[in-house]
């Protein structure tokens, strides 16, 4: 079946004329969404895009993913397509223009089959929007796909899309990657432009990639990466393509590792500890030097992160007269954010910058850092959400994902790899992070790990 092929293999089949972009679109459009992957489907638009690709012919500069379908996370405005931002307050909103990520994906010759599900404004680490069914992991459809890129991850893991972009402000690519058994790559701050909205003044969030293989994730990063005039910060250009980096020997690396959660009073599930220990042994067997280090970010950074997170939530407002449609968690976080004064917000950002600088200095001698991705396997739908007590909801989210946001603070690239599985068949990711702008090294190592302990042939029920 076509969906058994990697995204790059599908792109290669298009290049050789063995399959057309329209045939790929029709194949994926015919697959049933049993995992809550999409809020809105755009099959007819994808068909029209695929026909245009065929009519105009393959450009000389076409990339390896030309003709390969994907989906767009429902946080990205898409011209003429309902875009809800995961919120009932925007359940009928249709933008007039697309943001740059959407335009970039379209220009790369990748038809979009629809808007992948996300929680309200992308805030929670689970995907249970009021405008669509919960996004669930295909490995056990009673359990969450994670968030906030849960729909994208569910779609890729269930074979409804070959790969997909996501976004990540505190783990929102890596969390669903772990829950769904995927590669989830959050690139460096500034690697992918946030034009034209620049909605995150703190610098925590970035777009990134979700895929079944490291090479697929790298190829999509090649599509998305790039600087725009006006970007407030950017990463230096890579030495070549990120896909080419996957074929390089990373050499012998110094690997820092820690397992203590950045957030206090978190119980770590044995499967997360086992995944981390097994990954440590694998890296050691590959010839890398693995060393224990103290947690590089102090726990008082959590309060500053929460202040910034609350203010960012408050910036996402409902249309006038629709405030009552916002979820209790969003209203609670927004109230916290509106209570923060301008100077308090500025000081919180300043302290996060200082925490980041301290962490980068502490880790400067190391090439990569190894931690678990999550504190536990994917939990049942509804286990984190608590509309009656948003503070408890937020506390549960922190306990679920006590490591990922550290690398949003530092701006380091980080990837979750599906290296472990529980006895009952649930995926458990491990996370590797590299110095800022060193995605090439990170991808080189991730590809080496994948070659040693491959996972792409695993198939969830219903595949």
Image: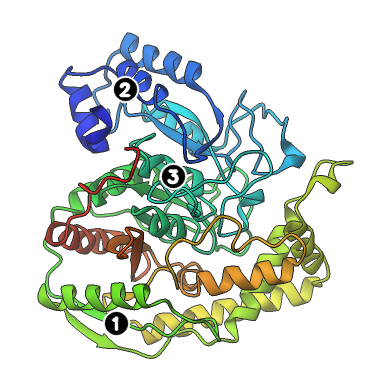
Left or right, 338 with respect to 163, comes to right
Percent x, y of residue 120:
66, 49
Q: Residues within 10 Å of mark 1 (few under 14, many from 20)?
A: many
Q: Are circles 3 and 1 on residues that touch, CB within 8 Å? A: no
Name the image quarter holding residue 396.
Answer: bottom right
Q: Earlier in the sequence, mark 3 or mark 1?
A: 3
Check the image and report above or below for 62 versus 315.
above
For the point 24% across and 73% down, which residue is it? 279
How far across and down, in percent of the image, does residue 63 sit? 27, 33
Q: Which residue is mark 3?
A: 154
**Is 287 left, or right, of 323 in this rendering?**
left
Residue count near mark 2 (Cα–Cα under 10 Å), binned few <14, some 14–19, many ≥20? many
Q: Is residue 305 above or below residue 172?
A: below
Q: Which residue is denoted by mark 1 in the rendering?
A: 256
Q: Which residue is mark 2?
A: 24
Q: Secondary structure at mark 2?
A: helix
Q: Is residue 251 among what the camera can see?
A: yes
Mark yes or no: residue 64 visible: no
Front residue of 390 and 95: 390
Quadrant containing the N terminus is top left
């Amino acid at each position: 079946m076509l969906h058994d092929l990697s995204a790059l293999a599908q792109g290669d089949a298009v290049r050789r004329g063995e399959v057309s972009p329209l045939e790929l679109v029709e194949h994926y459009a015919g697959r049933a969404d049993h995992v809550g992957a999409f809020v809105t489907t755009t099959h007819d638009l994808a068909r029209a895009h695929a026909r245009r690709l065929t009519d105009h012919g393959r450009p000389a500069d076409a990339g390896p993913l030309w003709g390969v379908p994907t989906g767009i996370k429902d946080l990205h405005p898409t011209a003429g397509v309902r875009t809800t931002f995961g919120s009932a307050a925007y359940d009928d909103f249709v933008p007039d223009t697309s943001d740059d990520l959407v335009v970039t994906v379209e220009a790369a010759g990748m038809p979009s089959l629809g808007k992948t599900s996300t929680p309200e404004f992308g805030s929670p680490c689970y995907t249970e929007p009021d405008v669509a069914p919960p996004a669930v992991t295909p490995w056990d459809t009673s359990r969450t796909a994670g968030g906030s890129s849960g729909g994208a991850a569910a779609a890729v893991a269930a074979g409804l899309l070959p790969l997909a972009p996501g976004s990540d402000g505190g783990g929102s690519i890596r969390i669903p990657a772990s829950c769904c058994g995927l590669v989830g790559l959050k690139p460096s701050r500034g690697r992918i432009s946030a034009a034209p909205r620049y909605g995150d003044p703190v610098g925590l969030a970035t777009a990134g990639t979700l895929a079944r293989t490291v090479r697929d994730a790298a190829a999509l990063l090649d599509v998305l990466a790039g600087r725009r005039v006006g970007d407030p910060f950017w990463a230096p250009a890579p030495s070549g393509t990120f896909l080419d980096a996957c074929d390089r020997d990373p050499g012998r690396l110094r690997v820092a590792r820690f397992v203590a959660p950045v957030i206090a009073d978190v119980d770590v599930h044995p499967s997360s500890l086992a995944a981390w220990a097994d990954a440590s042994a694998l890296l050691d067997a590959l010839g890398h030097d693995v060393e224990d280090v103290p947690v590089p970010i102090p726990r008082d950074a959590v309060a500053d992160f929460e202040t910034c997170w609350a203010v960012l939530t408050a910036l996402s407002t409902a249309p006038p007269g629709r405030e009552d449609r916002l979820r209790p968690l969003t209203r609670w976080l927004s109230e916290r954010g509106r209570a923060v004064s301008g100077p308090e917000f500025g000081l919180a950002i300043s302290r996060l910058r200082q925490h980041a600088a301290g962490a980068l200095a502490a880790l400067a001698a190391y090439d990569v850092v190894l931690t678990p991705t999550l504190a536990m396997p994917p939990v049942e739908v509804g286990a984190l959400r608590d509309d009656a007590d948003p503070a408890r909801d937020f506390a549960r989210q922190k306990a679920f994902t006590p490591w990922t946001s550290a690398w949003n603070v530092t701006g380091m690239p980080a990837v979750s790899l599906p290296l472990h599985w529980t006895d009952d068949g649930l995926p458990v990711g491990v996370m590797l992070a590299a110095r800022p702008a060193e995605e090439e090294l990170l991808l080189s190592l991730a590809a080496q790990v994948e070659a040693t302990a491959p996972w792409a042939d695993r198939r969830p029920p219903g595949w």
